[in-house]
Image: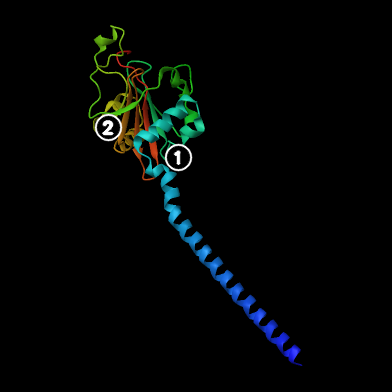
């Protein structure tokens, strides 16, 4: 009888010990889970910072991506810079006056010269580092006769496009009244303009709160009319 009593006490003690150990393991697991959850919450902003959305991109980074997509003729990537609601205007000068053509996507573009696609301009656009300027370099047609681009300084430059917002050259483009209003409205939205001096091409961008958008691409070459 005494033997059974001792055995019972031993089993009871063993059971209590197992239960206590299980509780300790559960608490430890909960603590680890809590730490993991806290780390996940703390790391989430870091992930967002390391992978910025288009709305957080500086203009220089955004244009670098635009230029890279242009060089690789990636029309899908280029279309990310086109506002699906507004589209963009292509400005050319096939004759004595500028020609404005509106497109909703990059793939639609047919240039006045041989109906070439938009990405055909890569042939004239050598890579260069984008630099910020308060004003673009001075231009003189006479300098082109000396084998130069005509600009006092060559490169890729960007600045605010205040003067372009007030340009009225659209008056000579034979546009409808509605098209003229659309051009003027979009001009007022322009925030940055890029000049690529080797080609003389200019690109006008705005930020819509989420993305940088191309509003105008001016492919006119000075002194060529």
Label 1 near label 2: C-beta < 8 Å?
no
| Residue 221, quarter of picture | top left
- Residue 68 spot, x, y in % from top left: 45, 28
Alpha carbon distance from label 2 to label 1:
22 Å
| Residue 140, quarter of picture | top left
- In this view, the residue farthest toward the top is 146
Residue 161 numbered mark, or none? 2
Q: Is residue 79 left or right of residue 12?
A: left
Helix, strand or loop status at disc 2: loop
- Residue 124 spot, x, y in % from top left: 41, 17
Residue 105 seen from this side: no
For disc 1, the neighbor class at 10 Å (few under 14, some 14 to 19, many from 20) is: few
- The residue under the point 36% across, 45% down is 209
- In this view, the residue farthest toward the front is 2
When the figure is inspected, residue 28 is found, relative to residue 69, above or below; the finding is below
Along the line of sight, which residue is nearer the eye, 8 or 216?
Answer: 8
Residue 54 seen from this side: yes
The nearer-to-camera label among 2 and 1 is: 2
Residue 84 numbered mark, or none? 1
When the figure is inspected, residue 45 is found, relative to residue 216, above or below; the finding is below
Along the line of sight, which residue is nearer the eye, 205 or 128?
Answer: 128
């Amino acid at each position: 009888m005494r033997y059974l009593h001792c055995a019972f006490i031993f089993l009871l003690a063993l059971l209590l010990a197992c239960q206590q150990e299980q509780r300790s393991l559960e608490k430890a697991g909960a603590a680890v889970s809590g730490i993991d959850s806290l780390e996940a919450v703390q790391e989430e902003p870091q992930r967002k910072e390391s992978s910025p959305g288009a709305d957080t991109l500086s203009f220089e980074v955004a244009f670098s991506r635009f230029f890279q997509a242009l060089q690789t003729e990636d029309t899908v990537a280029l279309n990310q810079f086109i506002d699906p609601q507004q589209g963009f205007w292509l400005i050319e000068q096939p004759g004595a006056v500028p020609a404005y053509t509106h497109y909703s996507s990059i793939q639609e573009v047919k240039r006045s010269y041989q109906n070439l696609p938009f990405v055909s301009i890569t042939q004239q656009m050598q890579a260069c580092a984008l630099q910020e300027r308060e004003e673009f370099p001075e231009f003189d047609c006479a300098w082109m006769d000396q084998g130069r681009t005509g600009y006092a300084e060559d490169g890729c430059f960007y600045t605010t496009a205040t003067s372009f917002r007030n340009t009225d050259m659209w008056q000579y483009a034979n546009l409808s009244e509605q098209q003229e209003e659309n051009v003027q409205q979009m001009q007022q939205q322009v925030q940055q303009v890029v000049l690529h001096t080797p080609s003389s091409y200019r690109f006008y961008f705005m930020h819509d709160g989420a993305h940088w958008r191309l509003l105008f691409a001016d492919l006119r070459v000075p002194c060529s009319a």
